[in-house]
Amino acid sequence: MTLNQIGIYSFQLPLHHTLNVKGQKLTTREGIILRLRDSHNRISYGEISPLPGLHEETLDACVKQLAHIQSELTGAYIPKPSGIFGFLDTILPRNNWLPSVRFGLETALMALYLQNDLNHEQPAFLAIQQQRIKINLLVTGEHGDIIRMVKRGLNEGYRAIKIKAGVGKLEEEIDLVRMIRRLSGPDISLRVDANRCWRLEEALSFIQALHDCPLEYIEEPLQDPGQLPLLFEKTHIPIAIDETLVQYRPEKLKLADWMNTFVLKPAAIGSLTDTLAYIHLAESNTRKIVISDNYQTGIGLTFLVRLAASLKKPIPMGFNTYNYLQEDLLMDRIQVSGGEIFVQDALERSKKVNLSCLQEFSDSLALNESDNQRNKTTGNLRSGG
C-alpha cells in the first residue's frame, strides 16, 4: 500500500453540557482529522483529539508534529498491516510520538487495511469475536440529573453504570451510590471512578460504608497510587487501573493481585502495539479489560468498537462519552440500542464522513506557518452535522 495523499482537517463540535475534566471546563470538542488516500484510491480517516486535562499534548503541538512528518508520510509504502508500527518508528522514535498523533495515524493506516476489499490482508489481532458491544452508562452532574439518567438508562437496557465520584462530599456520594443500587437492583454492575481524588482514609471510609452494596470495581481511587496495594489489602475491593497502568510500558508492568481491571484508553496510550500488549497481558492473566474513549467523535470511536469486538471476554465498554457530543462528524451517528453497539452497523456508518464539518489546513504544514494557519483555521470552524 502506498500513501498518495494526506489531508489534514480541524473540527469543533458542541457538547450537550459543560465538561469538567480535572479542572478544565469544556463546552466544545475539537481536534484534527486525517484523511488518507492510497494508490488504489481507497480512503480512510483517523482522529487526533487530545482532551485537555487528560492528554499532556495540546492541539497546537499535534499540528507541529504533523508538520515535521507530513512529507515523510506522503508517498510512503507499507507492505502489510503489521508493517505500520515499524514504519512509524522509522519516522520518529517511539518515545517522541505524541500519543494522540500516533493513535490517529495508526488507526487511519489500519483502516485502509480493514476495508472490505482487503479482507485477505486483515490482521488477526483485530479479528471480530463479538457482533455486539455492551457499554456502561456514564452518569455525572447533580443528583437529580443522575437519578433521571439512571432511570432512563435502565429502561433503555443498560446493564452497567459508571458513577463519577470524588467531586462532591463523601457522604453525599455514598448516599448516591446506595440510591442507584436501590434503583438498579442486584443484577446491574456498578462501577465507581474517583479519578485519583481521595486520600487513603477517604477511600477506606467510602468502601466500608458500602460494604453491603457490591461494586464491580472502583477505578483509580487514590491520589497516591502507590497506596493501592494497601487499599486492596484492607478492603479486598476490586480495583481498576487507568492512569496507573499507562505509567508503565507493558513489558515493565508487574502484575499484582490487586489489579482487577485494565481500563485502556488507546488515544492516551498512543501506540496500538502497547495497547495490544496490555490486552494480551490482561487476557493471559484473567484480568478484565474495558476499552474506553475520551469524548471522541464517531471516527475515533469506530476503531475502538472494532478493538473491543476483538476481545475474548465481553464486558461493558466505556463508550458512553460519545453521547455527550451534540453533533458528530459521521453523516449517521453510531447508534446504541439496549445499551449495546452493533459492530457491523457502526462500521457501515463510519464510511460516511460529513466533510462540511471539517476545515482543511493548507496542503503544506511548514513549521514557520503552522501557528498562523492553526489560528486562521480555528477562527473559521464550522460545527455542522
Image: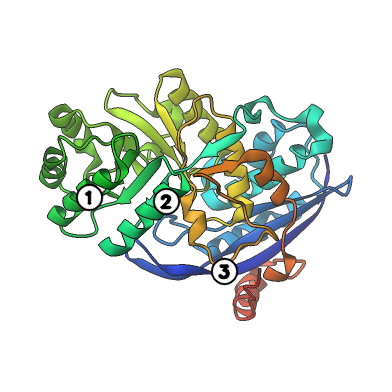
Residue 50 is situated, as x and y percent measured from the top left of the image, at 51, 58
Q: Does residue 43 appear in this view?
A: yes
The kind of residue tagged 1 is Met
Q: Residue at x 53, y 24 (%)?
A: 312
Q: Does residue 223 appear in this view?
A: no
Give the answer, above or below, for where 132 lies relative to 150: above
Apparent side of residue 318 relative to residue 195 in the rendered image (left or right): right
Residue 278 is situated, as x and y percent measured from the top left of the image, at 47, 30
Label annotation for residue 153: 2
Task: Please state which of the two labelled residues, at mark 3 or mark 1, is closer to the viewer.
Answer: 1
Q: Secondary structure at mark 3?
A: strand
The quadrant of the picture occupied by the N terminus is: top right
Q: Would you identify the image quadrant in which residue 169 lies?
A: bottom left
Question: Upstream in the sequence, badge 3 or badge 2?
Answer: 3
Q: Are discs 3 and 2 less than 8 Å apart at CB?
A: no
Apparent side of residue 206 relative to residue 67 in the rendered image (left or right): left
Q: Are discs 3 and 1 less than 8 Å apart at CB?
A: no
Which residue in the structure is indicated by mark 1? 179
Apparent side of residue 39 relative to residue 110 in the rendered image (left or right): right
